[in-house]
Amino acid sequence: MKDALKVYAPIALLVLALTIIAMRMVAPPPPKTISFAAGSKDGQYFALAERYQSALEAHGIAVEIIESKGTIENYALLLDGKADVALLQGGLADDAQRAAVRSLGGMFAEPYWMFVLENTEVNGFGDLNTLNIAAGPMGSGTRALTERLQAEWGGDWGPLSQLAGSDAAAALLSGDVDAVVYSASVEAPYVNALLANPLVQLVPMRRANGLSMRDPALEPTVLFEGVVDMEAGLPQADIKLLSSIAQLGVSKDLHPAIQSVLLETAEPIHSQGTILTRAGIYPNASQVDLALSDEARRYYRNGPTFLRRYFSFGWANFLERAWVFLLPLAAALIPLVQMAPPIYRWRIRRKIYVWYNDLHELERRGIEAESKDKRQAVLDEIHNLQMEVGTVDVPVSYNDELYHLRSHINFVEALIARQKMSAV
């Protein structure tokens, strides 16, 4: 065991040192914690961020959710480096945001809802220009999209109320505002409440097709007759809406492995259909107004990496980072490992050969001894050598050489003993 350790321990230490050096040269590992800019705590974005948080925890990634006012603030958080990931309403990016933020694809359609009280003479968005509109707070996606649509239609528009959500719906029913607009999921409770209220009418977006041709992150959507409530016949006719496609945005330097696991997570979260879109449409790579990240392009083309299909996120990422250096390292280590057995054999045989040198010297001294006492001293040394050799533990494959040595010791001992008897 001592001989084996003396041979293999230095090689093991060398292998360890080379591995450490190689690992320092590989790409850095992905972060263990990311920040996710969502929306208000009672909104859909925040609820979705919590689903991402739960899913990513299973991969060992902690998600810090940042509450915000909406898409505009989410863009600011990404640009300031305070957020790594954010849900972003489509159709609102400016040039600076397009340069700094990358998209992981369109995740779901967010209809732009316009509600007014029954019997209000409104046939489309342009007719809202004389009304007091609740469009959400500054920094929200709803307000930003409303201001953009106002610019598209042109003309003079009054100031927008900052009421949002259920507060805006209550203000509409009380007459404090003339119209409310939301960029929100059909599952939003205030949207459902207004859709079911007979005192409220949903205003169609008559130019949805034209707007979608001007911006790939906008899409015409149809709320089909009866789809909300078939028994009550809600809505009572097909209504064309304009939907902005919510995207998963990331800072452009976010680690590719994190982007990949986000895309894996997005699949089960967003692939289910709604009453507005059929299953399997989202996530997709086409309905975006930001440039897709390189990792997203690769993912939509090929899916998860080969290693990710068979290993956990942590192991797959380690192997994907390390293989570039580990393969050449393994090639360099093969000769070192192959050298170990010959070196080990040499060390065992060298010990036996040293004893042969000692035995040869004792034989010469015993034959040349001129007195009985000197020969007896040589015989005592031979006896001690025999005892020493008898206590040595060698691998089974070397026992034959050890026993040859012991038989040769006996032969020399007998030879010198005969010399002693002849001298007598």
Image (tube, rainbow, N blue to C red):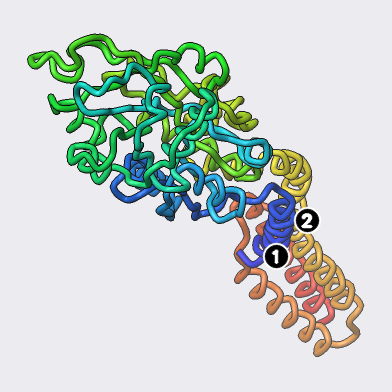
Q: Residue at x 50, y 16 (%)?
A: 212
Residue 245 located left or right of residue 184: right
Q: Nearer the viewer, residue 285 or 264?
A: 285
| Identity, as a three-letter code, of the amino acid under mark 2 | Trp
Q: Count residues near mark 1 (Cα–Cα under 10 Å), then give few for <14, some for 14-19, many for 20+.
A: few
Q: Seen from this angle, which residue lies furthest left? A: 231
Q: Count residues near mark 2 (Cα–Cα under 10 Å), then give few for <14, some for 14-19, many for 20+.
A: few
Q: Is residue 389 visible from the viewing direction of this image?
A: yes
Q: Secondary structure at mark 1?
A: helix
Which residue is labeled 1 in the image?
A: 6
Q: Nearer the viewer, residue 139 or 185?
A: 139
User: Which of pointers 2 and 1 lies earlier in the amino acid sequence?
Assistant: 1
Which residue is labeled 2 in the image?
A: 346
Image vertical order of residue 377 relative to residue 106, above or below? below
Residue 117 located left or right of residue 355: left
What is the quadrant of residue 1 in the picture? bottom right
Q: Nearer the viewer, residue 16 or 297?
A: 297
